[in-house]
């Protein structure tokens, strides 16, 4: 009898573990190249990341229609890390060691990237990270196709300080309390002070995630803005806290003409959930806007509408980052003649592909890319009018020169083979000398 | 006699299974050619075992003492943070800024000195003490106030929830000095063993299995002792127990503190295996999930709680990979169906089924 | 082109604004599409100074993105809806040019600000007092010395006392920017000091460092007195914010006060029922937008009963399908309803997509009105009223109707109620349905201030439980008191501690409070409590 029960329990254990060890839906098609897609499809981040999963599926389908890569078809492997950071690490490991993905496109939040980082280093694979972030990182296995702070935050502040931007003299740095806003605000604070803005003209505020009662904060901004100097708000407010923030701004009658808000995390997709009439004139800084008219962008938008079957689905900046990153990866694989991670990592720097706004982006030796910076004003229809743009492409800079701890650091994976090289001490930090 | 009381049939089978696992996995991963047990699975099993220990800790207070804690995730996370702090200090000068004392995130936010509460965490023994001491102390203080004031039932549940929620918000703050939202990551090694190596992973998994076995036996020992009888008594009729002359709050406080320490150990073993600890471990949803493991496995059975944790976590791993778009439907339906169809949890149903097959009576515990 | 433009601007300035004729107006309007935003703003200012009767129309078209350039370079105003174009300079109809042949004249914030000031000056003598008031307010906000003449004229002609006072203050603000005599400036400072609001502070602040010691002294004392006034008003403002937050908390929690507080079901799906209410509002608005746009102002009034029915029906289904089997095992309701909440969330995500949905605010829900020096936003005010109305209705149902009596009887003593002939099963379903339906109503209100996304419910569930427990489960008065107490406490803490720390303090406060009163603010007394 004991035997019966033990076999029963044992059987259950076996039944429970066996499927984990089987590759998902064994297609037995060994001649495909697997591409991992690691974006949350449920939980708090699903709101932003689901679109990126869709755009990757579209890009892979398009590439397959063109004949795939190295004569093989690409096979997307989608998993749901469910906005749960340890689950990101688990799923990354699954994609690499169980599904044998050649490359992974994924992550949105910094913490999810930090969580999967050791896995990519340990198993030596490639991650393309498509979102603007705080910088202060450059890893061999990660390629950062979103904006570094110098490709978003600093140009935006420059614009507002200019005559066309309204010669702003007083600054509110309003953010959600986590690493990206904290770091960005620190860089901006140092930058503003270097431009002669006195400390009393800078106000920094933080609010929790998903903050929804903005009455006090908005009235604080209003009071700060009535000191007789032109005031602007630099917003690093994250995700779903934005909608109630903008609603409160609109209702308390803060118009863009009086106190403009420039946001780094609000794009076309976020505005789709908002009545944008009261927001006309508020700004956003990105490397891409759907409204920019170029042949590449028109083709991309049409393909996107066709792929999703929804002519109203908007496109946004992180989607473009995936577009660039994916095309770079394809080129690098073709250049290397293999999908082996080491070869592709070595082949990627120097690869150039057209972006969607008419320029040609290049993967730099520091694993960041060169991008143009655009400042857009919100229009009534939820799109942006570009009111300013950089002259050419701006190279991404992971280590901010405005912070004392990183001003001497550079990253170069081609000649120096180091992500954090100290130019003063002439050593690659963190490696045992 | 004592041993048989401690290890009943159910416990025996589970421990035997656990033993087989701790032997088979290392052999399969390290010594058999072709690696029939991939390292990926080792890390996964290790994680499940930590969850199982956490579930046992909760079952001890909920199943045997009637305290429905919706804040056990907090004790787990605190244990994890204590271990994470040690692992951070262990990185030493290998961080990206190569600061020999300060962890990267502190350099990052511009701190010049190590805050006092980080001192000494470069010693493993101190971290090991803190892993149980911090959750234990919090549970003791919290419980001392709550049980003395006779906060019971849902009121207690909700204030434990408030506790973990407040801790989550606090740990989110960068000024706290625990890495804010990013938490503690990028660990290199533990006691000199490289965390990325197969051997370390296998070792940690085996350690988790041992901890789970020890936790189960400790819980079983407590619940089968005289003290355990009092606990069940106060679970079922608190006032009556009090009128019989027992200092109810002392019993509760003891068991709550022990349980929190067990949760802390689970967290400490969890962190090096998943490689990150961040404030979302404090989230209220996580703590509710622990309750669900216990309820699903079978409340008040210890073994059932461990089984429930492994089943739910395993189901999550599989479903998020197989049906990334639809898995929440499946998981939700599972919770609903189990509650309605299997009132005694999976273990209860399993044993009930076997019992009926044998035309025998269910075990005594299953009825309790 | 830029150079030519500069010359045009300079020439016109030299010629003097009053003498600018129709030809100059045409020249300026035709110059609008060219040059940088900075230069465009200069042209806007010049257009304002021409005083041309068509200036307001042209500038407003520019602000609304309706000013376009045809292929041949003619500047036209195009009607948004019909697409009909009229010449910007002379107002003659030019037919309906195709949209492709038109280029929009773009503006940015700086140009918009210039437009606002220019049209403000032009509408100072408008026959509509509301317009004059708005113009006066603009003049105060963007005071500049060259407005004084126009303001003097407007003050002379003004009949409305309120507008006149505001105009005088605007003039004072403008005087401060001139190099007028010290006495005149000090008088202006006194005038603005009496106004005592943020606009006055904005006008005065730059003079705090004035060279003239008398002016500096006057400004410093004026600013201090304004700060004092503002401090008092800020107190009132905090109370109002607290009430508003409290009303939101109460609305979200009051449904839970029934399902959880009265029935003892730990309903983890409560947040998702709130979310269903919000999505019902979204669907109603979608239908209205597509088929009956004139009804938009009524969309919330239509959505509220529908949300009540939808959430109530889902609630009854949950009760009949699941909760019914679990009476006597209250803690297991937590497990089952958690499962339900996952399913509802994912269902909404599958049907409506994972991102935010746009729920608009009808006109009467947008904007704010001043109450003294406070800004009271309409949406918050209406939500407060709505919360009280829901609460009153609920109280009425529970205390004054037969079904309410039955509900109370069943929850107090199920067996005895059954013996008295009450169909307890039906009453359970209705009670749970009522709690759920009220959650749906809360969703309608929350859709006006928060995201409508699948995560909506998750953001409120913890707070709702806190409110119910803090107030004392089983007593809906407690829920009301709990909601408002937590709301006001939160809003008074926030300015000192910041939003994050404030919330932590509140949570710790709740924990400590429960030690003091283990059954919440309004404890239910009696033997049944222990059971």
Image: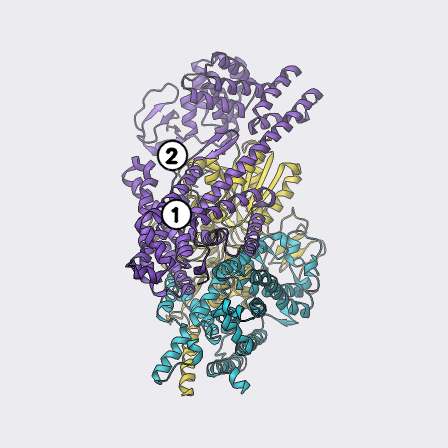
Query: As rendered, which of C315 and C211 lies closer to the eye?
Result: C315
Query: Does dot 1 land on a helix, a strand or a loop?
Result: helix
Give above or below for B220 relative to C73: below
Circle 2 marks a residue in which chain? C
Looking at the rendered structure, whether the residues under marks 1 and 2 are on a common chain is answered as: yes
* x then y, percent, for residue B12: 49, 83
* x then y, percent, for residue B168: 55, 56
Say which residue label 1 marks: C443
Chain corresponding to cyan in the figure? B
**Image hue for chain A:** yellow
- Which of the two labelled residues, at mark 1 and mark 2, occupies the earlier sequence position? 2
Specify the label residue A285 is tagged with: none
Viewer-nearest of discs 1 and 2: 1
* x then y, percent, for residue C511: 55, 55
Chain corresponding to purple in the figure? C
Count the labels in the image: 2
Residue B188, quarter of the rendered image:
bottom right
User: Can the viewer see residue C275 in this picture?
Assistant: yes
Residue A174, quarter of the rendered image:
top right
Say which residue label 2 marks: C363
């Amino acid at each position: 009898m004991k035997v019966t029960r033990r076999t029963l329990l044992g059987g259950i254990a076996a039944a429970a573990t066996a499927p984990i060890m089987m590759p998902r839906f064994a297609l037995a098609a060994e001649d495909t190249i697997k591409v991992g897609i690691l974006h949350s499809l449920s939980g708090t981040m699903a709101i932003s990341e689901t679109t990126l999963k869709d755009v990757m599926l579209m890009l892979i389908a398009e590439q397959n229609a063109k004949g795939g890569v190295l004569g093989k078809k690409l096979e997307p492997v989608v998993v749901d890390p469910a906005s749960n950071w340890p689950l990101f690490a688990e799923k990354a490991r699954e994609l690499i060691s169980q599904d044998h993905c050649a490359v992974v496109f994924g992550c949105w939040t910094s913490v999810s990237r930090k969580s999967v980082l050791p896995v990519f280093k340990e198993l030596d694979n490639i991650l393309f990270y498509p979102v603007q972030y705080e910088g202060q990182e450059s890893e061999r296995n990660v390629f950062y196709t979103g904006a570094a702070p110098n490709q978003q935050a600093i140009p935006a502040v420059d614009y507002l300080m200019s005559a066309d931007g309204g010669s702003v003299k007083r600054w509110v740095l309003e953010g959600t309390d986590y690493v990206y806003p904290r770091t960005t605000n620190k860089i901006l604070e140092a930058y503003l002070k270097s431009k002669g803005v006195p400390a009393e003209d800078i106000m920094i505020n933080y609010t929790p995630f998903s903050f929804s009662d903005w009455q006090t904060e908005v009235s604080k901004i209003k009071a700060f803005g009535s000191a007789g100097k032109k005031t602007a708000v630099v917003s690093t407010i994250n995700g779903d806290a934005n909608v109630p923030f903008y609603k409160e701004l609109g209702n308390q009658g803060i118009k863009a003409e009086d106190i403009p808000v420039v946001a780094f995390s609000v794009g076309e997709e976020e505005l789709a959930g908002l009545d944008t009439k009261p927001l006309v004139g508020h700004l956003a800084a990105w490397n891409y806007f759907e409204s920019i008219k170029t042949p590449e962008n028109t083709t991309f938008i049409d393909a996107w509408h066709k792929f999703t079957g929804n002519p109203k689905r908007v496109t946004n900046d992180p989607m473009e980052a995936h577009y660039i990153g994916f095309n770079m990866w394809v080129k690098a694989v073709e250049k290397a003649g293999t999908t082996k991670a080491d070869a592709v990592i070595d082949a990627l720097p120097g690869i150039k592909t057209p972006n969607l706004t008419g320029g040609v982006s290049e993967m730099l030796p520091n694993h960041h890319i060169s991008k143009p910076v655009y400042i857009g004003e919100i229009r009534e229809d939820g799109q942006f009018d570009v009111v300013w743009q950089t002259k050419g492409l701006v190279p991404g800079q992971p280590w901010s020169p405005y912070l004392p701890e990183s001003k001497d650091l550079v990253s170069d994976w081609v000649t120096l083979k180091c992500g954090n090289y100290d130019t003063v001490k002439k050593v690659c930090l963190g490696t045992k000398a | 006699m004592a041993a048989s009381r401690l290890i009943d049939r159910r416990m025996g089978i589970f421990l035997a299974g656990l033993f087989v696992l701790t032997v088979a996995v290392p052999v399969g991963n390290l010594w058999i050619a072709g690696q029939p047990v991939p390292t990926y699975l080792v890390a996964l099993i290790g994680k499940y075992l930590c969850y199982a220990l956490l579930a046992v800790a909760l079952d001890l207070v909920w199943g045997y003492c009637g305290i429905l804690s919706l804040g056990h995730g907090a004790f787990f996370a605190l244990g994890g943070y204590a271990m994470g702090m040690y692992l951070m200090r262990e990185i030493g000068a290998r961080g990206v800024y190569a600061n020999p004392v300060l962890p990267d995130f502190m350099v990052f936010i511009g701190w010049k000195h190590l805050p006092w509460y980080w001192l000494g965490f470069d010693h493993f023994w101190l971290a090991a003490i803190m892993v149980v001491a911090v959750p234990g102390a919090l549970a003791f203080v919290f419980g001392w106030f709550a049980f003395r004031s006779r906060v019971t039932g849902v009121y207690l549940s909700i204030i434990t929830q408030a506790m973990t929620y407040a801790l989550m918000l606090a740990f989110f703050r960068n000024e706290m000095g625990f890495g804010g939202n990013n938490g503690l990551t990028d660990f290199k090694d533990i006691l000199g063993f490289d965390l990325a190596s197969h051997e370390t992973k296998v070792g940690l998994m085996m350690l988790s299995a041992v901890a789970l076995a020890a936790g189960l036996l400790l819980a079983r020992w407590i619940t089968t002792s005289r003290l355990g009888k009092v606990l069940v008594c106060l679970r079922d009729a608190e006032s009556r127990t009090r009128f019989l002359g027992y200092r109810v709050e002392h019993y509760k406080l003891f068991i709550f503190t022990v349980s929190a320490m067990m949760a802390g150990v689970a967290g400490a073993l969890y962190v090096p295996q998943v490689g990150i600890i961040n404030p979302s471990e404090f989230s209220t949803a996580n703590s509710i999930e622990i309750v669900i493991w216990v309820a699903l496995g079978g409340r008040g059975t210890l073994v059932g709680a461990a089984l429930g944790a492994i089943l739910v976590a395993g189901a999550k791993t599989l479903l998020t990979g197989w049906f990334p778009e639809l898995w929440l439907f499946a998981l939700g339906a599972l919770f609903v169906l189990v509650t309605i169809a299997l009132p005694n949890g999976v273990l209860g149903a399993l044993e009930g089924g076997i019992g009926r097959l044998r035309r025998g009576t269910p075990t005594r515990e299953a009825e309790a | 082109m830029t150079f030519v433009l500069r010359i045009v601007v300079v020439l016109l300035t030299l010629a003097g604004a009053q003498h600018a004729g129709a030809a100059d107006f045409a020249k300026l309007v035709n110059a609008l599409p060219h040059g940088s935003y900075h230069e465009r703003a200069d042209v806007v200012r010049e257009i304002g100074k021409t005083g041309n009767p068509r200036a307001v129309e042209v500038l407003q078209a520019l602000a609304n993105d309706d000013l376009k350039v045809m292929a041949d370079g003619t500047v036209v105003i195009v009607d948004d809806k019909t697409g009909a174009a009229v010449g910007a300079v002379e107002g003659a109809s030019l037919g309906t040019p195709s949209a492709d042949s038109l280029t929009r004249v773009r503006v940015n914030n700086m140009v918009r600000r210039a437009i606002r000031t220019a049209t403000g000056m032009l509408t100072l003598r408008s026959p509509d007092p509301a317009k004059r008031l708005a113009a006066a307010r603009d003049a105060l906000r963007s005071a500049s010395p060259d407005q004084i003449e126009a303001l003097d004229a407007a003050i002379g002609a003004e009949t409305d006392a309120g507008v006149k006072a505001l105009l005088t203050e605007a003039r004072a603000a403008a005087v401060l920017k001139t190099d007028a005599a010290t006495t005149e400036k000090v008088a202006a400072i006194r005038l603005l000091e009496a106004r005592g609001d943020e606009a006055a502070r904005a006008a005065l602040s730059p003079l705090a460092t004035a060279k003239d010691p008398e002016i500096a002294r006057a400004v410093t004392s004026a600013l201090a007195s304004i700060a004092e006034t503002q401090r008092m008003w800020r107190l009132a403002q905090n109370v109002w914010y607290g009430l508003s937050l409290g009303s939101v908390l109460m609305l979200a929690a009051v449904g839970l006060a029934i399902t959880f507080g009265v029935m003892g079901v730990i309903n983890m799906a409560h947040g998702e029922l709130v979310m269903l209410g919000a999505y019902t509002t979204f669907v109603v608005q979608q239908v209205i937008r597509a088929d009956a746009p004139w009804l938009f102002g009524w969309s919330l009034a239509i959505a509220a009963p529908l949300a009540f029915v939808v959430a109530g029906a889902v609630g009854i289904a949950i009760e009949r399908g699941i909760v019914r089997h679990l009476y006597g095992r209250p803690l297991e309701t937590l497990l089952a309803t958690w499962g339900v909440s996952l399913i509802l969330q994912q269902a909404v995500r599958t049907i409506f997509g994972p991102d935010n949905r746009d729920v608009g605010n009808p006109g009467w829900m947008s904007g704010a009105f001043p109450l003294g020096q406070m800004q009271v936003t309409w949406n918050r005010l209406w939500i407060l009223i709505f919360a009280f109305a829901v609460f009153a209705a609920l109280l009425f149902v529970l205390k004054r109707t037969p079904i309410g009596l039955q509900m109370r009887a069943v929850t107090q003593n199920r067996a005895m109620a059954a013996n008295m002939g009450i169909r307890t099963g039906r009453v359970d379903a209705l009670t749970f349905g009522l709690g759920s339906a009220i959650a749906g109503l809360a969703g309608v209100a929350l859709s006006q201030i928060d995201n409508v996304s699948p995560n909506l419910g998750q953001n409120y569930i913890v707070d709702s439980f806190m409110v119910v427990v803090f107030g004392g489960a089983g007593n809906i008065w407690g829920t009301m008191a709990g909601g408002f107490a937590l709301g006001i406490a939160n809003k008074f803490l926030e300015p000192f501690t910041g939003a994050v720390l404030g919330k932590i303090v509140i949570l710790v406060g709740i924990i400590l409070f429960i030690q003091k009163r283990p059954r919440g603010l309004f404890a239910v007394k009696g033997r049944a409590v222990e059971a």
